[in-house]
Amino acid sequence: SVSAIIDNHAAFRVIIKATDGKDLLDQLSKSINPDIVLLDLIMPRMNAIETIPVLKKKVPGAKIMVLSGYSNTIDIMLIHQLGADGFLSKNAGAPELLEALQKLLENGRYFPGYESLLLKKPDKHTVTGQIHKLSNNEIIFLEYACTGLAYKKIAGIMNLSRYTIDNYRNELFHKFGVHTRQALVLMALKYKL
């Protein structure tokens, strides 16, 4: 496990293990001040996208590295914009994990292969080009999704079946390259869609 790899290295020590972002935030106290926080991108209750902004306020000096089983450019851009300091694939071996942690401490960031992309200012047209053109119903659904209404309620308002609403959601997840409603809403707000 990641925590075992870290604990077996002389330079690092695991001080908190949490099941998700909420559990982590509950365990953090004024007396605990980690140098690095590792977050899984996808977690129950509070995922990394929801946790990063709160964590940046609670422990502003901590470096945040997000781990994920896949690397998606839009997710990496999003976690970077939210304040994450690094990204590493879960497929990385122990030497790469330890090197990433060391580089994060030394350089303040670790986004291997994404540095040039993250140094550029976001280009709305490039990102929307990747997302493809949204249909009118997808735009209407996205507006309702941003309000926090339950999907069942959105289906009723749009006079569509829950199955159709689920299809819109899944299609938008695919077009935006995200996996959570929160990430979808953040992308919609970021690009003013």
Image (cartoon, rainbow, N blue to C red):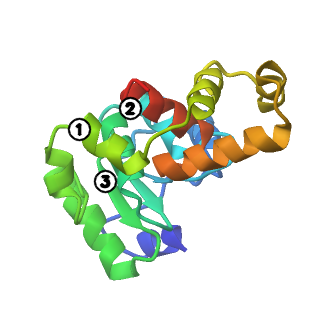
Q: Amino acid at mark 1?
A: Pro
Q: Quadrant of residue 13?
A: bottom left
Q: Amino acid at mark 3?
A: Gly
Q: Residue under circle 2?
A: 56
Which is nearer the eye, 155 or 116?
155
How many circles with numbers are drawn on the protein? 3
Report the disc number at residue 122. Answer: 1
Q: Is residue 10 found left or right of 136 in the rendered image?
A: left
Q: Is residue 8 above or below residue 127?
A: below
Q: CA distance from mark 1 to mark 2?
A: 22 Å
Number of the front mark, 3 or 1 = 1
Report the disc number at residue 165. Answer: none
- Nearest to N terminus: mark 3 or mark 1: 3
Which SS class for mark 2? Answer: helix
Q: Amino acid at mark 2?
A: Lys
Report the disc number at residue 86. Answer: 3
